[in-house]
Amino acid sequence: MEKGKLQEYWKINLGYLIGLLVVWFVVSYGFGILFVNQLNAIQLGGFKLGFWFAQQGSIYVFVILIFVYVALMNKLDKKFDVRED
């Protein structure tokens, strides 16, 4: 792969990483700690939503983000023709 395409590939990859890490930070730290009092006004399955995000929600979101990252990287690999078969 030529240098320009390689730099573009890594620029897009880092954009994906930063975006997904921001989502994870907002969900785990924001919803689980900063906005917990506001979210606790909402019930989810008998539990306060802020408590749920702090205990389980951020883990679920993290696992979902892993699958999103895999899908995005497969698409990016196909675009730059560097996929592994």
Image: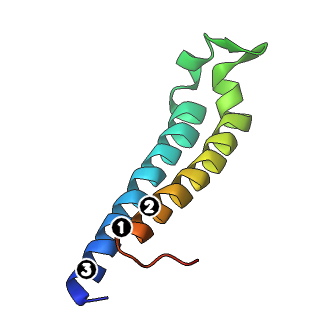
User: Decide: marks 2, 1 in contact (CB < 8 A)?
Assistant: yes
- Judged from this view, the residue extending furthest toward the front is 85
Residue 18 percent coordinates (x, y): 39, 58
User: Decide: marks 1, 3 in contact (CB < 8 A)?
Assistant: no
**Number of the label disc, if any, that sits on residue 11:** none
Residue drawn 61% across the image and 42% down it: 61
Label 3 environment density (alpha carbons within 10 Å; few <14, some 14–19, many ≥20) = few
**Between discs 1 and 3, the one toward the N terminus:** 3
Where residue 17 sits, quadrant-wise, is bottom left
**Residue of label 1:** 79
Residue 59 percent coordinates (x, y): 68, 44
How far apart are labels 3 and 2 at the CA level?
Answer: 15 Å
**Number of the label disc, if any, that sits on residue 75:** 2
23 with respect to 55 (left or right): left
Residue drawn 65% across the image and 32% down it: 53
At label 1, which amino acid type do we have?
Lys
57 with respect to 6 (left or right): right
Foreground pick, 13 / 71: 71
At label 2, which amino acid type do we have?
Lys
**Number of the label disc, if any, that sits on residue 5:** 3
Q: Secondary structure at mark 1?
A: helix
Where residue 16 sits, quadrant-wise, is bottom left
